[in-house]
Image: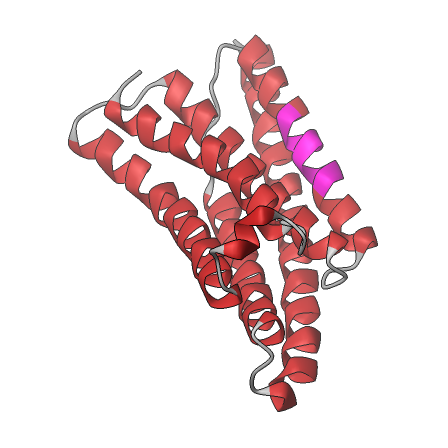
Amino acid sequence: MTLANRITLLRVVLAPAFFLLYFVPAGCPIWAWASPILMVALLWVIFLVAEITDALDGMVARRLNQSSDFGRLFDPFADTLVQLTFFLCFVLDGIFPAALFLVVVYREFGILFVRNLMLKNGVAMGARMSGKIKTVAYITACSTAMVYVTLTRLDILRFLHGILAVAAVAVFAASVVLSVASFFDYVSVYRSSQKAKAAE
């Protein structure tokens, strides 16, 4: 377990922590010492640390020469776990449409299947540019939703609530389109590898 992979592992731990904190019931004893402002702040800390470590683990792996097939698979796995957890929270909270979330889930399982097919060919397929663009879109959608959650939970700037609600859904829909496009990009890579293997 290299330093880069330990950083990636942190995201795996933060995903369920975010979910549990997001849905802390009002009657829970934690509210005895934690104000809504503190609870929202903690959500932001987890959210930001998860997103920062997404970039940090790759930088560390390259700087310390710790790149490996395991890391190339573990990193997108952690990314998917975090992203799906964030999306699920926003779906259950009524911010994101469940139908779009289902498309994302199908896409992620599809990518997992393609990666397994590539492994059969002895290739550990890491993130591609289309996947990175998709990730940026996911982060943008989640950031918009987080701003909406912040304002509504703190009950401030009410005139922005409706605008942010629409914006969050619009950005999420755009990210879903990009995710589907990136799926076909990964499929094209797999097909190319199959043709190259057949030509050997």
Q: Position of residue 11 (x, y in %)?
A: 44, 36
Q: Is residue 127 visible?
A: no
Say which quarter of the image contains residue 68.
Answer: top left
Q: Main secondary structure of the magenta part?
A: helix
Placement of 180 over or under 68, stated as above or below: below
Placement of 43 over or under 169, stated as above or below: above
Q: Residue at x 56, y 83 (%)?
A: 156
Q: Residue at x 51, y 50 (%)?
A: 135
Q: Is residue 43 visible?
A: yes
Say which quarter of the image contains residue 91.
Answer: bottom right
Say which quarter of the image contains residue 120.
Answer: top right
Q: Is residue 179 left or right of residue 59?
A: right
Q: Position of residue 27 (x, y in %)?
A: 67, 52
Toward the left, the furthest residue is 64
Q: Residue at x 47, y 40 (%)?
A: 128
Q: Position of residue 188 (x, y in %)?
A: 62, 34
Toward the right, the furthest residue is 99
Foreground of the two, 116 or 197: 116
Instruction: Provide the residue span drawn in magenta.
Output: 105-112
- The question of residue 107 being in magenta is answered with yes
Q: Is residue 49 left or right of residue 164?
A: left
- The question of residue 121 being in magenta is answered with no
Q: Position of residue 126 (x, y in %)?
A: 45, 30
